[in-house]
């Protein structure tokens, strides 16, 4: 039988998904296939048999026009179901023409488009308990982290334009912001489940260019002139040689921050780690004595 496909607007889809509709497959010569924003209605054309389906055709092998490219993870539909408790009374449209005890009514939540996608909730009747698609909460947490802007340390000291001296304590510290130190918070949702992640720098490892490495568990302490020749109480280093023999006569200093991300959602919690890096060139000389 020749069939004809008719596209229904997104507004019609919303209405269809919002109000349960009773359908009788035995009486319907065609069918309805719904995508995210459109439905295709397959209508039988009396008196015509055989041939191919009409319409614009598609590339998915079904004769229909798909709403997204196959394999695009951001267009994947994820649905979760929750048994309606209590069940609707007999005669409710939610039963879709069935009687209580014949299957059950569930609350269906479907999400499209990944983190920023749409979600539709509706009541559906099912003859058997639905298979639940498992949402990987750790993957969802990583999506939240990927939506953040996590950068390397914003180095305040040592400065590339500064001049430092052998034997004189160097104070190291970083400027703090949501993107360079934290806290930084973001959420991601799929299938009606939302995971919220909060990231903050837990440590910064400084490689000083002279072979030394310093681990600081905080942002460091800003230096003030009143401190004189004192060493930093939280994050510092003392060079024992000049940078004269280094390339460009400067030590390559690398500050690597470890972001610790705690997430929770869907009744679970976990932790992720991200690493970011910033480089600076530091000139270290000797004290010049004037005689």
Image (cartoon, rainbow, N blue to C red):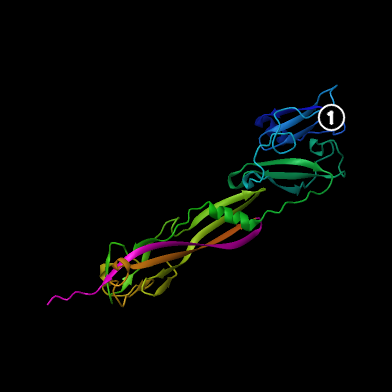
Q: Is residue 119 left or right of residue 144?
A: right
**Location of residue 253 by image quarter:** bottom left
Query: Taking 58 as reference, is 282 above or below it?
Result: below
**Residue for badge 1:** 29
Q: Is residue 109 visible?
A: yes
Residue 6 position within the rendered picture, expressed as x and y whole percent measured from the top left: 72, 27
Is 278 in the magenta? yes
**What is the quadrant of the N terminus in the image?**
top right
Please tell me how crowded label 1 is: few (under 14), some (14-19), or many (20+) other residues with Cα within 10 Å: some
**Location of residue 262 by image quarter:** bottom right
**Residue at coordinates 51% horizontally, 53% vertically from top-left?**
148
Residue 43 position within the rendered picture, expressed as x and y whole percent measured from the top left: 79, 27
| Residue situated in front as seen by the camera: 141 or 47 | 47
Is 143 in the magenta? no
Identity of the residue furthest to the front in this view:
51
| Residue situated in front as seen by the camera: 227 or 6 | 6
Q: Is residue 43 left or right of residue 279?
A: right
Residue 286 position within the rendered picture, expressed as x and y whole percent measured from the top left: 24, 74
Residue 101 position within the rendered picture, expressed as x and y whole percent measured from the top left: 87, 45
**What is the quadrant of the C terminus in the image?**
bottom left
**Residue at coordinates 66% horizontally, 58% vertically from top-left?**
267
| Residue situated in front as seen by the camera: 26 or 188 | 26
Please report the bounds of the magenta region as a residue range. 266-291
């Amino acid at each position: 039988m020749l069939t004809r496909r008719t596209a229904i607007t997104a507004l019609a889809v919303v209405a269809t998904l919002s109000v349960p509709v009773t359908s009788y497959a035995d009486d319907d010569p065609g069918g309805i296939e719904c995508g995210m924003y459109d439905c295709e209605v397959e209508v039988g054309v009396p008196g015509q048999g055989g041939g191919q389906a009409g319409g614009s055709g598609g590339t998915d092998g079904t004769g229909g026009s798909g709403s997204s490219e196959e394999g695009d993870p951001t267009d994947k539909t994820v649905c979760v179901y929750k048994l309606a408790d209590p069940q609707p009374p007999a005669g409710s449209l939610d039963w879709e023409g069935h009687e209580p005890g014949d299957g059950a009514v569930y609350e269906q939540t479907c999400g499209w488009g990944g983190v920023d996608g749409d979600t539709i909730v509706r009541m559906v009747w099912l003859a058997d308990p639905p298979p639940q698609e498992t949402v990987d909460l750790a993957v969802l947490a990583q999506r939240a982290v990927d939506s953040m802007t996590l950068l390397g340390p914003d180095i305040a000291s040592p400065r590339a334009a500064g001049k430092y001296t052998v034997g004189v304590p160097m104070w190291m510290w970083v400027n703090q912001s949501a993107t360079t130190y934290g806290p930084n918070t973001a959420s991601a949702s799929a299938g009606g489940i939302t995971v919220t992640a909060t990231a903050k720098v837990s440590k910064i490892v400084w490689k000083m260019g002279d072979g030394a490495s310093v681990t600081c568990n905080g942002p460091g302490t800003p230096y003030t002139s009143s401190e004189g020749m004192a060493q930093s109480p939280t994050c510092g280093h003392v060079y024992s040689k000049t940078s004269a023999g280094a390339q460009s006569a400067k030590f390559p200093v690398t500050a690597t921050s470890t972001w610790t991300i705690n997430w929770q959602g869907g009744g679970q919690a976990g932790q992720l780690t991200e690493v970011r890096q910033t480089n600076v060139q530091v000139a270290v000389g000797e004290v010049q004595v004037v005689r």
